[in-house]
């Protein structure tokens, strides 16, 4: 392993007023012997020392196996992923539409299971949709689905895309300003970037791996200011990060009940109670997404930070 230097300043605001939160929790060799550091100026939290680019490239080349033991094909998991990505698509449409044609030139970084792009292309089939995927195995699923597959940032054309999608990717990087600055060069002057990240998930998860960066609204706003991006919307979505024990238990029971209905092939006509959702979600997708509170923006820190930004020109 490359020996990494400890960070002496914040990756977002450059302040040197840092404190140690605790040890970082990870299983892979790459994520051992790290600490969580907090910037006392902008409240940004990050792993320290951060892995080098070449180390992350190696880990991410088999990301889903290394980080998650592979992708789940269980109907409940696939329904949840489909639902949350449809909600993200609708959020982006609401933020950027303004009467314009949304058959756009789009770049998605780390498309995962491809649910976002599938729903977007279902809505706007004349879009030119391209991806950058680091996981070598996962690239195979997108053959024939997208216009272009890029394997590195160097291949991506400058000043070309109307919309760039960065959903649950930024928290895996080791330099958020450099990462977003590079991508802003690929964006047209009138283009948009959609970003979603977990919100301070080190506070409520059992381990941090594979996440390296931990944002809240304050630190994310500072990041956008530092890279000269205009914030169109930045909000909290999902369950509160300070969730009561009783609510956690109720959610587990709820999912077990949904699993039993699915096992015995019992169909619940849940969509009739959610007319807005049923226009784009199946009954199972509605059932899976309900506990996540993923649609309505919250006032307090919640599981996800969701944003749309544009170049500040």
Image (cartoon, grey):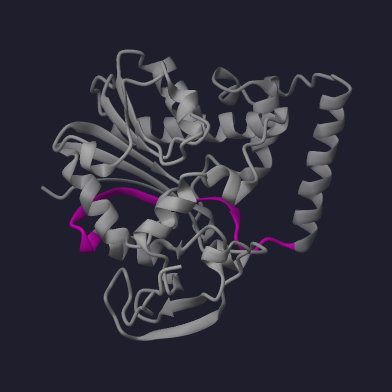
**Is residue 229 one of those drawn in magenta?**
yes
Residue 136 lies within the magenta run: no
Q: In this view, does 116 lie to the left or right of 67?
A: left
Residue at figure coordinates x 54%, y 20% from the top left:
280
Q: Quadrant of residue 152?
A: top left
Residue 298 x, y percent position in the rendering: 51, 52
Q: Is residue 97 in view from this perspective?
A: no
Residue 65 is left or right of residue 89, and the answer is right
Prevailing secondary structure of the magenta residues: strand
Q: How many labels does the image show?
A: 0
Left or right: residue 188 versus residue 183 is left
Pinpoint residue 297: horizontal percent, then vertical percent.
48, 47
**Residue extending furthest left?**
313
59 is higher (above) or lower (below) than 45: above
Of 47 and 88, nearer the camera is 47
Q: Residue at x 22, y 36 (%)?
A: 156
The front one of 35 and 4 is: 4
> Could you say where residue 6 lies in the image, as x and y percent from the top left?
38, 80
Residue farthest toward the front in the current orientation of the protein: 1
Q: Which residue is at a point 60% across and 58% down the rendered structure image?
A: 240
Front position in the image: 222 or 56: 56
Residue at x 66% of width, y 38% of height: 290
Q: In this view, does 122 lie above or below 114?
A: above
- Residue 93 drawn at (x, y percent): 36, 30
Q: Would residue 11 be visible to someone looking at this image?
A: yes
| Occupied quadrant, residue 165 | top left
| Residue 5 to residue 270: above or below | below
The part of the chain drawn in magenta is: 225-244
- Taking 278 as reference, is 167 left or right? left
């Amino acid at each position: 392993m490359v020996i990494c230097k400890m960070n002496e300043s914040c990756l977002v605001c450059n302040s040197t007023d840092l404190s140690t939160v605790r040890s970082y929790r990870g299983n892979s060799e790459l994520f051992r012997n790290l600490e969580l550091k907090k910037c006392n100026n902008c409240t940004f939290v990050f792993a320290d020392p951060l892995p080098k680019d070449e180390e992350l490239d190696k880990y991410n080349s088999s990301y889903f196996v290394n980080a998650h033991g592979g992708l789940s094909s269980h109907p409940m998991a696939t329904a949840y992923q489909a639902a949350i990505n449809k909600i993200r698509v609708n959020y982006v449409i609401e933020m950027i539409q303004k009467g314009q044609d949304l058959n756009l030139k789009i770049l998605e970084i780390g498309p995962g299971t491809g649910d976002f792009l599938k729903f977007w292309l279902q809505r706007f089939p004349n879009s030119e949709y391209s991806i950058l995927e680091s996981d070598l195995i996962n690239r195979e699923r997108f053959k024939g689905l997208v216009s272009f597959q890029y394997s590195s940032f160097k291949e991506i054309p400058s000043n070309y895309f109307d919309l760039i999608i960065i959903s649950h990717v930024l928290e895996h990087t080791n330099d958020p300003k450099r990462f977003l600055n590079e991508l802003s060069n690929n964006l047209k002057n009138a283009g948009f970037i959609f970003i979603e990240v977990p919100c301070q998930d080190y506070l409520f998860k059992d381990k941090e791996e594979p996440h390296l960066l931990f944002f809240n609204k304050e630190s994310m706003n500072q990041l956008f200011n530092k890279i000269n991006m205009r914030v169109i919307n930045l909000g909290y979505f999902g369950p509160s990060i300070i969730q009561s024990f009783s609510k956690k238990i109720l959610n587990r029971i709820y999912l077990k009940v949904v699993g039993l209905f699915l096992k015995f092939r019992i169909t619940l006509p849940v969509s009739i109670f959610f007319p807005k959702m049923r226009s784009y979600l199946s009954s199972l997708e509605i059932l899976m997404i309900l506990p996540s509170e993923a649609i309505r923006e919250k006032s307090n820190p919640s599981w996800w930070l969701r944003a749309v930004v544009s170049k500040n020109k």
